[in-house]
Image (cartoon, coloured by chain):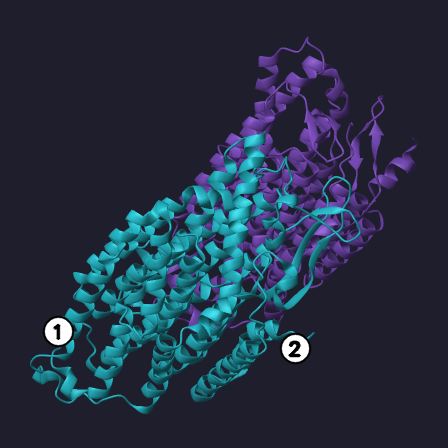
Amino acid sequence: MDGFPILSLITFLPIVGLVIVLSLPKEKAQTVRITTLVITSIQVILAVILLANYNYGLAGINDPNSFQFVEKFRWIEIPGISWIGTIKIDYFLGVDGLSMPMVLLTALITFIATLSSWKIDKSVKGYFALFLLLDTAMMGVFVSLDFFLFYVFWELMLLPMYFLIGIWGGPRKEYAAIKFFIYTLVGSVFMLLVMIGLYFSTKEILPDGSSAYTFNMLAMMNPHNYVSTGILSPLNPSNLRFIAYIALFAGFAIKIPMFPFHTWLPDAHVEAPTPISVILAGVLLKMGTYGILRISFPIFPNITRELMWYIALFGMINIIYGALVALAQKDFKKLIAYSSVSHMGYVLLGMASLTSVGINGAVFQMFNHGTITAMLFLSVGVIYDRAHTRGIYEFGGLANQMPVYTGFVTVAFFAAIGLPSMSGFISEAMVFLGSFGTEVIRTLAIISTLGILLGAAYMLWTLQRIFFGKLNEKWANLPDLDLREYVMLVPLAIVVIFLGIYPSAMLNIMNTSVKHLVDFLAVNAHHISTTISAL
Amino acid sequence: MNLSQALSFVKPEIAVSITLVVLVLFDLIFHKDKRIIPYLAMAGIVVTGIILAANFNLTGTAFKTGGQYGMFTADPFANFVKMIVLIATFLIVLFAYDSDEINKITDRLGEYYALIFGMVLGMFFLISASDLILIYLSMELLSLSSYVLAGFTKLRDRNSEAALKYLIYGAISSGLMLFGISLVYGMTGTTNLFEINSLIQTPDINLYTFAFAMILIFAGIGYKISAVPFHYWTPDVYEGAPITITAYLSVASKAAGFALLIRFLRVGFATYVDKAGNWQVLDLFDWQTFLIIISVLTMTLGNFAALWQDNLKRMLAYSSIAHAGYMLLGVLVFSDKGVTAVLFYFFVYLIMNLGAFYVVMLIANKTGSEDIDDYDGLGYTAPFLGVTLAIFLVSLTGLPPTAGFIGKFYLFIALLDAKMAVVAVIAVINSVVSLYYYIRVLKHMYLTKNDNAPVVPVSKLAFSIVLVLSTATLFFGIYFTPVSDWAKSAAVILGIG
């Protein structure tokens, strides 16, 4: 694979698709759909090729030499005049055990979402153009190792998402779209300031011996690169670095979404069309937790250690609060949206443990939540397409009417509850193993187990309300799944069950990196704390 | 220095004056065919541009009044801003081709272009002025030309209202400025900024009188850059004037005002520039705190007032007030880095703001209104204008991957380098607020259903202008090295220290 820019290809392939789609005449809706499907299929193939060539033994995280498929060259360089120093921004891509599962997830979910978009027939061309732009942005976030590049991809995602919800969404689409946009933008502008602050606090030693400020994330992680006079330097007696950590964390937390920043999520989900809900829950939410693991943790190890209890606390609130609110929902889609809030809480709890098991569980949970929630939202879409309603109480007894559909929904529900032999079980178990093992957050972990109980309650109750009991006569003519829906649901069900039986397939990918991250955090947190206390 | 040497510094100004005279003469001699006048104007701009580019690094002062320094300063900084003004002028001349408003006054086209060149001449001198008298004179030349242009078409009552409001506010602020200048002359005995710099470094200066004089002078400058609280004229004038003139005022005359402010501070108050490019500023008057307050007020008021506007021209007027607030951020850090950021921002703002105004003008040609409700569903019937307007507005918001993002990025870099985190936080919150009103236009264009949205025809010329501007907005958002190199090499201001 040496020298072949496979990451650029997988990231910018959708842009090629975008150009093709835009050059097609408006009437050729079917060609537009097929083009998008071909592009996303190639992305899946490329992701599989990446996986086949992936070296499980390399760690990544902070070590540029153990990242894989690296592409690095100078993107912007403004040579140094004495008074400004060199400004340099790299085009720097690479994957490690944290990003590899996310790349696989993004490719898979985008492919499935394309199929799910098949029935959209309002301005098809515009829809798929924005869809492909969103695809590039998501992939870009997961493979960038330069903060500036990461930020550009992060923001690039907002506009297509705004239009996809705002134009193709439900009755309150305008409100939902602008709410999503403003919430996320608030988070990301603070990220911008933190990014610039970190830039002025990091000086990388160049091969020729001179030093330059840099946006390279890996350089920001290395304590040797700190500029003591930098605005966000840990050696700076002001507490700005601490505030910056919280601002950055909040930026990511809005995306997760973490309580109390979660209110945009139910609105966005309820109004978004099914494929966009699938992408939102399947991929977008993961960006928040991915950003925390990729950026917040390794760049601020000592502050992370100080705040781990609070991160776990918010994880716990997410789990319990999300489950309780889900219990009260009458709208099927809203219920799934709140179950997402609850399930992302496990990710927070797992990573707050700062143990190898816990963070492995968290990353695994990110992947699993992506596949399981995608299945759940597709299921909502299936029933909504047929009945044009999502009210849980309007259904009942669908099990006899739509047996195959019921089967898939049951798989998804049980996976979400965390039934053994399903992927959700493994990751949740690991999250709890990790968090029980960490003294500081043990109490919070114990309270969080309530979430499993509540989860089972709202899921099983919903299953009962929709599928069992007496069939509402109104729905006596609902057909079961068609071929397209099979193609969407079968691969996800296979992944969910396969990873439930053989989780190592995924855990092996991330394990080396996660272990390295945990060691790196421990060593550096200690190192920085001693340096500060020595001052 | 003899006269010919001194004149070599003002070659671009001479070129502008010759164009101005040629335009007036041509208009007097050939009554019939006015169609050729825009070509003459463009030729004048191109020649001036070539002269500017050839003398880009020329540095020095001319027209000495006895001391070591003259009243006119040439340096790369001035040439950069003059270039911005020229590009804006060139685009405005092109815009006029497709402007219904301007095409209705073909018989007065000669005066229209002559007045525009009057403005250019005023701005050129303003950008280079290092003497309070020259500052005042060039400011008046600029203002008098713009007063007439604001009401030039006389097509609507709004035109005259705009011109009158502009004139009244302008007269008051230039009066205040003149009073401030006279106070400074009274205290120092000179009007030359270089000499003022050394003369005010004595304990004899009464600090209160001096502060009073500075605030009065800032009233004149603040009026030109529409900084709060001297912004009152902006929304009414921008709404009432022909769109080409509105666009021109929002970019060129604002850039000239900023150039004046920067030079005034750099030459008059900076005593020493260290190796990192940070200016040491005299502490007679706390310019930094003063400008922080003005900047925060300007961006906040501009953004919040824009939220409620239903007329797009008016909304863009408030947005341009907000952008003046952002640009002040680059001034108040008192460093070469800040000047680079402001210069970079000028360039980006030129592209995106003129682009936005032009698309609004093309749409108004068809619909006859700039009301936001008339944009309903327009994204589907005018796909090209819709997408490009979206690009310009996203760039004005400052989202990647557009040039507007890079502009803001540079300003924040300068700000955080000066360790002003709190101001930076206020600025980013402001840019979130601005998202709401920019995106509102997109909402009307794309999210609101309207089966009767008009089809907007786009001429070949208009198509290419919009295409070039929108491509540049995206291109410089992804690859901005050439512009930032240029801006950085131009952050050289002739001054003391």
Left or right, residue A155 beside residue A405: right
* Foreground of the two, B376 or B477: B477
Instruction: Tell me: residue A328, above or below residue A79.
Output: below
Residue that badge 2 annotates = A1
Colour in which the image shows chain B: purple
**Mark 2, secondary structure of its residue:** loop
Between the residue at mark 1 and the residue at mark 2, the CA separation in whole angstroms equals 52 Å
For mark 2, name the chain. Answer: A
Q: Are marks 1 and 2 on the same chain?
A: yes
- For badge 2, the amino acid type reads Met
Q: Residue at left 55%, top 50%?
A: B246
- Quarter of the view holding residue B339: top right
Q: Are marks 1 and 2 in contact (CB under 8 Å)?
A: no
Residue that badge 1 annotates = A465
* Foreground of the two, A376 or B159: A376
Left or right, residue B281 beside residue A455: right
Q: Position of residue A58 (x, y in %)?
A: 59, 66
Q: Which chain is cyan?
A: A
Q: Compare marks 1 and 2 and give the one earlier in the sequence.
A: 2
- For badge 1, the amino acid type reads Arg
* Residue A343 seen in this snapshot: yes
Q: Nearer the viewer, mark 1 or mark 2?
A: 2
